[in-house]
Amino acid sequence: MRKVMKFGGTSVGSGEAMSRTADIIMSYDCQRAVVVSAMSGVTNSLLEMMGEGGREVPEYLDWLRQKHHDAARGNISNELMPEYLEQLEHRISGLGHLVHLYRQDEDRVMYQDALASWGERLSSLTLSFILRTRGADSLALTSEEIGIVASGPPGNGSAVLPATESNLRRTLSPLLNEGKVPIITGYYGADLKGRPLTFGRGGSDYSAAVVANGVDADVVEIWTDVDGFMSADPRVVKKARTIAEMDYGEAAELAYFGAKVLHPRTIEPAKRKGVAVLVKNTFNPSGQGTRIHGLDRNSKELLRSVALKTGLSIVKIYSSELVYQPDLVAKILEAISADGTTIYAVSTSLSTLAVVVPTGSVPEACNRLKGFRDQVEAVKVKEDAALICAVGDGMLESCGVSAKIFSAVADVGANVELISEGASDIALNFMVGGSKAVDVVKRLHELYIGD
């Protein structure tokens, strides 16, 4: 058995949390690689340090040093502590040097991802020494050292899977075969020039799946602070329950459209190799969790889960040219997403294009649309909209599913503002006014998922 285990910020957020995580890792007797996020609050502090104002750099460095020293105290033996402190200081000094370069250089973009990734370099070092104290043959490794290759824009990179796999077979697999327990930095890879490139917030989940893909793991375990995927957000639906197993597609849809359990891109590398994904709760390790794999299931359930994503707006672009210029829609969508804006849904008609984006991205999107003033007659924005993602394996193959769902929407007096149907065989996505969104989710769960 070969597994990759990922532990998020809350799972390594304190000395107590790291001790609990070490217990979980030591409880397994198999080949295992561990991917970690930064300790809770560290990445935010690093991003804050890059801004103007705030505390002086030495204060930030002192805070980071103390936070990790506190986590180590009582978890790392007296014999290993001097070596740990020496390596911790080396990495803190490296961060200080990088901040100095960042503030001296007018072209700061190339430094930002490197700075943002520093928390993982500190947490992986600390956890590795804790495991060594407990007798594990552990070592801390960076993404650069094992060869996670990435490409794409800063802050939103993607792993280059073939190149990464080739590197990991050379760097990581031999260590696993020797019984070592590598603790690897999550959240980022390195481009062809060796520069860190982050995968977006929460990207350590994705890193773990990339590693699992590269070493042909049997399973990638995502250890977090929830019991797994649920039939709805338990803060919205009190009777929501944990889903024991899901298909890759179901989990990917829910992660993308609102379930804050996995980074949305985690499924992709795992699915390519048929690696099972197991979501577990660090604070409830005996819980069953959710197992995600390829399922051949003819479910009789209409719905498996209902996800809700708020803070969205519908931007409607009116143009009589849409039907006569086939490439106009593509150009408009490219313009809206040019700054990394996520487009959650698209709907078209003869002369209207409706696009769903985060409300905070609306001003910039509208500004970019000014470049189409000769082809666009009007742009209207409907704010305070919420996207509801109703997921069920094969649900759209059943007759009358949409009618049943929209009947439930009508039950609570909500209007459907936009529909995205047919793009996926397992999900029906639609927009409603934000004030009615919670009522819709509760009604759908009551009718089609139940207790």
Image (cartoon, helix red, strand yellow):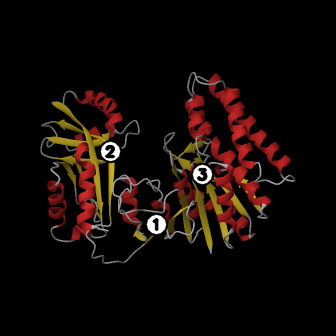
User: Element type at marker 2?
Assistant: strand
Q: Are marks 3 and 1 in contact (CB under 8 Å)?
A: no
Residue 194, quarter of picture:
top right
* Residue 211 higher or lower than 30, as above or below: above
At 21% from the left edge and 42% from the top edge, which residue is drawn? 354
Type of amino acid at the residue the image marks with label 2 = Thr
Residue 165 percent coordinates (x, y): 59, 61
- Where residue 145 sits: x, y (%)? 69, 51
The residue identified by callout 1 is 271
Residue 174 position within the rendered picture, expressed as x and y whole percent measured from the top left = 72, 66
Judge from the rendering whether residue 66 lies leftward or rightward of residue 396; answer left or right.
right
Q: Give the vertical position of 295 relative to 366 (above or below).
A: below
Helix, strand or loop at label 3? It is: loop
Look at label 1 and name its amino acid. Answer: Lys
Report the mark closest to the observer, 3 or 1: 3
Say left or right for 127 vs 326: right
The amino acid at mark 3 is: Gly
Q: CA distance from mark 1 to mark 2?
A: 28 Å
Residue at x 79% of width, y 44% of height: 87
**Mark positioned earlier in the residue sequence (1 or 2):** 1
Disc 2 target residue: 310
Query: Where does label 3 land, which residue?
Result: 186
Label 3 environment density (alpha carbons within 10 Å; few <14, some 14–19, many ≥20): many
Q: Dot 1: within a 10 Å radius of its alpha carbon, few (fewer than 14), some, or many (20 or more) residues?
A: some
Q: Does residue 364 show up? A: yes
The numbered mark, 3 or 1, whose residue comes first in the sequence reads: 3
